[in-house]
């Protein structure tokens, strides 16, 4: 049981990464590819946030205890650094999502299709 | 105090359970929406009340503020959830989902 | 009390699993919207339960409020889709009570 | 972290991901992806990453789902029937995916245990942040202080990336002329939506509170989860709610396109301007402690706190403008005439 707990997050992150990668490679529809890209991104974010988790740790906001500022135990707070990196990564991911969807719309406006092979046929 | 919290939570959980059973078992969209809209709102009211009460174990300003915030979520859900239910049902009606009737539909 | 809240959380997750069946299998897209709305309400409560387990509820209330808010916006947006495009199923099959359109 | 919840939420997430990929309807895929983001937010909360959860709740669950719905609205819901010749490429993709998974699984054997407090990642740099943040900056939320102060340079360019994304969307989609050569006719008839009184009334009641809440999130980011990114996105979401429930034109009357782009610029400029102000006052770029010279009645520590607040406001303004701009461009195909 402990080994399942200690590895489960990593397994899931690998599984989600595979799902996202498969969608990006094999799906014919462009919006499906974009969804696959988003799943891939969240898989990476799961990996980073899993690194930052600590057992018996609380959230990385220092509790107000009046004058108890001196006694900050590092193992008592989750690692804040991956949180910062992933916070900005999520915000950037919505930027990339917007650009990707805009490209899909542009392609649809031009070729009237979102399917990869139909667009290829029209290009040739 | 704890007993009240546990009771409210359990009733809320039961209400959620009823919602879910309705969501899974009812025959058509409108009856499912009926189960989801009502049960969800009631259950969230009960459970949020329980959590607000649990959080209020020690009377001071900070806890009062948190309890008020939780109750503001209740107010928000009470405004938003029926509106969302209305919007979904209206969309279904507009796009022509037919209500279920007791007579079986003619098989096509 | 903590173990009680953890049990409540796991029970809510189980109920979410059942709701997810409606979301994933639901015959029409509108059923899916309804399923997502129900999951969103459960999640709002689960967030505050997690806050209670951490004993830092004051930090989690804001997230739950923002969450309820955006759940509402997503539901409204998804249902407004059907005001403009009135076909329920993307290809026109698979729904028993389908209207006369498409 | 709470391992019981961890296991159950992760299982739900995998089911959602599978369903999103498998479902044969783009609108349904977008909706299930929304559920996926909701569960993701729950997962972050459960692992203790409250700021990440807040960002995911506002950005991931809210705005990206709405963007997906808008994009599907402007294109088509249909997923085409696949041709028979694609079987080979599918097999190749499957093999590549499995190989990648295998490599990652082999590497995973060497990872430290999940939730071990003594992993290399949490032993080297982060203890400094945890120990010193109150002493250095008087900000209890470590994530905010690292985001805005210790790694302020990083965040500035993240904001610039968002700004660039907004500009790219405008460059790709925006059409200023009425008729466009390469524009195809509408895919199929869009029926006129009738105004819905209930939704309009509730939206009108809620929008001021949403905007107040967004301002609170920006201002209170030092002491609780929240900050510029989250507050800006929630503020933008209030305009999106107005645009959905009311008319597109009505929101353009409040926030015209010109103002919107101007606001985006102003936001990034506030961020960079505070950096240059520090430079002018004789310190390093974005070293806020020197701001105590111009701010009345602040010492160096409080000056850092106030400097962070300033850049959070800049970030919020920029993100607000860019979110609105991306949404409007996608939902109206760059024509700014009518939306959802």
Image (cartoon, rainbow, N blue to C red):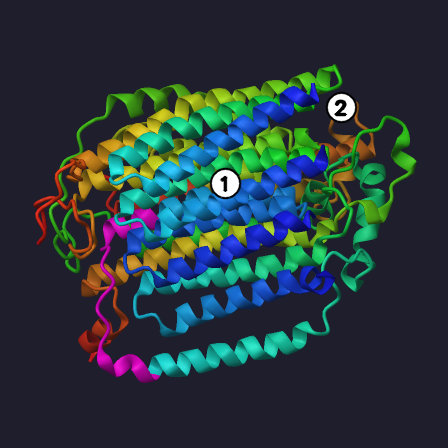
Q: Closer to the N terminus: mark 1 or mark 2?
A: 1
Q: Is residue D37 above or below residue D195?
A: below
Q: In front: D301, or B27?
A: B27
**The magenta segment:** D68-88
Q: In front: D330, or D284?
A: D330
- Residue drawn 36% across the image and 39% down it: B23
Question: Where residue D41 appears, x then y in whole percent?
Answer: 55, 46
Q: Pointer 1 and pointer 2: residues touching (CB < 8 Å)?
A: no
Q: Which residue is mark 1?
A: D58
Q: Which residue is mark 2?
A: D296
State the SS at label 1: helix
Q: CA distance from mark 1 to mark 2?
A: 35 Å
State the SS at label 2: loop
Quarter of the image with the N terminus of chain A is bottom right
Question: Where residue D73 appears, x then y in whole percent?
Answer: 25, 48
Asked whether D189 falls inside the magenta stretch, the response is no
Q: In front: D253, or A45?
A: A45
């Amino acid at each position: 049981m402990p080994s399942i707990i200690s590895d489960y997050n990593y397994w899931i992150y690998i599984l989600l990464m595979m799902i996202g990668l498969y969608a990006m490679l094999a799906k014919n529809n462009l919006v499906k590819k974009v969804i696959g890209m988003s799943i891939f991104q969240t898989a990476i974010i799961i990996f980073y946030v899993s690194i930052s988790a600590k057992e018996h740790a609380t959230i990385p906001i220092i509790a107000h205890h009046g004058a108890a500022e001196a006694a900050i135990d590092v193992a008592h707070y989750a690692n804040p650094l991956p949180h910062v990196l992933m916070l900005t990564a999520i915000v950037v991911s919505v930027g990339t999502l917007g650009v990707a969807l805009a490209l899909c719309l542009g392609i649809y406006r031009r070729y009237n299709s979102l399917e990869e092979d139909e667009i290829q046929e029209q290009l040739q | 105090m704890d007993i009240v919290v546990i009771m409210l939570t359990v009733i809320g959980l039961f209400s959620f359970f009823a919602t879910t059973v309705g969501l899974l078992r009812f025959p058509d969209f409108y009856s499912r929406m009926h189960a989801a809209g009502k049960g969800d709102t009631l259950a969230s009211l009960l459970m949020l009340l329980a959590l607000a009460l649990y959080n209020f174990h020690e009377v001071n300003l900070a806890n009062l503020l948190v309890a008020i915030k939780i109750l503001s979520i209740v107010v928000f859900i009470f405004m938003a959830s029926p509106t969302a239910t209305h919007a979904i049902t209206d969309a279904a009606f507009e796009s022509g989902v037919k209500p279920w009737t007791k007579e079986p539909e003619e098989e096509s | 009390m903590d173990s009680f809240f953890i049990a409540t959380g796991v029970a809510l997750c189980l109920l979410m699993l059942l709701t997810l069946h409606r979301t994933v299998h639901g015959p029409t897209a509108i059923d899916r919207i309804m399923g997502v709305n129900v999951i969103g309400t459960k999640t709002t409560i689960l967030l505050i339960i997690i806050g209670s387990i951490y004993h830092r509820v004051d930090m989690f209330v804001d997230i739950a409020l923002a969450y309820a808010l955006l759940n509402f916006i997503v539901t409204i947006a998804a249902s407004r889709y059907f005001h403009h495009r009135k076909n329920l199923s993307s290809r026109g099959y698979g729904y028993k009570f389908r209207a006369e359109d498409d | 972290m709470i391992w019981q919840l961890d296991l159950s939420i992760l299982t739900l997430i995998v089911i959602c991901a599978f369903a999103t990929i498998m479902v044969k309807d783009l609108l349904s895929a977008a909706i299930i992806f929304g559920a996926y983001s909701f569960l993701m937010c729950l997962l972050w909360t459960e692992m203790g990453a409250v700021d990440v959860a807040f960002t995911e709740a506002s950005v991931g669950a809210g705005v990206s789902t709405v963007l997906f719905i808008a994009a599907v609205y402007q294109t088509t819901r249909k997923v085409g029937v696949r041709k028979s010749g694609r079987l080979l490429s599918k097999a190749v993709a499957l093999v590549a995916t499995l190989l990648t998974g295998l490599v990652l699984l082999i590497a995973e054997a060497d990872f430290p245990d999940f939730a071990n407090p003594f992993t290399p990642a949490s032993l080297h740099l982060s203890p400094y942040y945890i120990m010193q943040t109150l002493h250095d900056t008087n900000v209890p939320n470590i994530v905010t202080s690292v985001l805005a102060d210790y790694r302020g340079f990083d965040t500035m360019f993240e904001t610039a990336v968002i700004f660039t994304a907004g500009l790219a969307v405008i460059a790709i989609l925006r059409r200023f002329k009425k008729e466009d050569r390469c524009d195809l006719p509408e895919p199929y008839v869009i029926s006129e939506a009738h105004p819905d009184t209930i939704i309009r009334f509730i939206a009108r009641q809620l929008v001021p509170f949403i905007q107040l809440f967004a301002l609170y999130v920006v201002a209170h980011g030092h002491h609780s989860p929240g900050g510029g990114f989250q507050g800006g996105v929630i503020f933008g979401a209030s305009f999106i709610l107005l645009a959905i429930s009311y008319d597109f034109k009505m929101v353009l009357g409040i926030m015209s396109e010109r103002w919107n782009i101007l606001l985006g610029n102003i936001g990034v400029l506030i961020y960079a301007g505070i950096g240059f102000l520090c430079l002018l006052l004789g310190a390093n770029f974005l070293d806020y402690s020197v701001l105590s010279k111009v701010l009345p009645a602040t010492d160096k520590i409080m000056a850092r706190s106030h400097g962070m607040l300033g850049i959070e406001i800049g970030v919020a303004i920029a993100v607000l403008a860019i979110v609105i701009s991306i949404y409007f461009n996608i939902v109206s195909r760059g024509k700014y005439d009518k939306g959802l």
